[in-house]
Amino acid sequence: MLYQLAVYALSQPSGAEAIMLYPTIGGHAVESRIGVFDAATGGQRAQIVQRPVDLLKLQELVSARSSATSQRARNAYAESLVFGNAASRS
């Protein structure tokens, strides 16, 4: 799977990310990143991002009574899965 993600990331413009979402029930899982480097220059060409999906949190969000607040929470979680968190990039 990592090989496929690396090939996909390398097929994009330099600096691209390939993101893999994986399920977890542990709230302690964190995002990780793997750099893909050019063998000739040694420079980083892309990144593979492994991002956890907390299934317990997802269940809670999906099961919540429909309201503006619950919809905002679902949207925020979906956005964090797609784009990541600013905190996870530091």
Image (cartoon, rainbow, N blue to C red):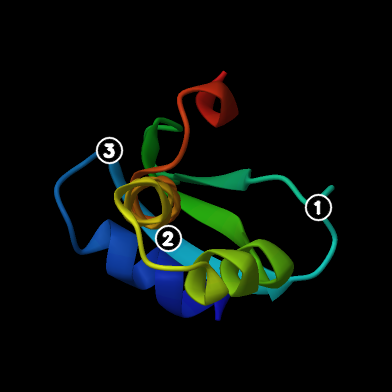
> How far across and down, in percent of the image, does residue 33 sit?
58, 44
Who's the residue at 40% across and 30% down the image?
Answer: 43
What's the distance in space between the residues labelled 3 and 1, CA to CA? 29 Å
The relative height of residue 48 versus residue 37 in the rendered view (above or below) is below
Residue located beneath label 2 in the image: 19
The relative height of residue 15 versus residue 6 in the rendered view (above or below) is above
Who's the residue at 56% across and 22% down the image?
Answer: 87
Disc 3 residue type?
Gly
Who's the residue at 55% across and 81% down the image?
Answer: 1
Instruction: Choose mark 1 or mark 2, whichever is in front.
Output: 1
Q: Are marks 1 and 2 in contact (CB under 8 Å)?
A: no
What's the distance in space between the residues labelled 1 and 2, CA to CA? 19 Å
Residue located beneath label 1 in the image: 27
Who's the residue at 57% across and 30% down the image?
Answer: 88
Residue 15 is tagged as: 3
Whichever of labels 1 and 2 marks the residue nearer the N terminus, that label is 2
Disc 1 residue type?
Gly
Furthest-top residue in this view: 90
> How far across and down, in percent of the image, does residue 40 sit?
38, 41
What's the distance in space between the residues labelled 3 and 2, CA to CA? 13 Å
Disc 1 packing (10 Å; few <14; some 14–19; many ≥20): few
> How far across and down, in percent of the image, does residue 21 sit?
53, 68
Instruction: Choose mark 3 or mark 1, whichever is in front.
Output: 1
Nearest the viewer among 57 and 63 is 63
> How far across and down, in percent of the image, does residue 11 sit?
20, 64
Where disc 1 sits, the SS reads loop
Disc 2 packing (10 Å; few <14; some 14–19; many ≥20): some
Q: Going by the image, does 24 lie left or right of 77? A: right
Where disc 3 sits, the SS reads loop
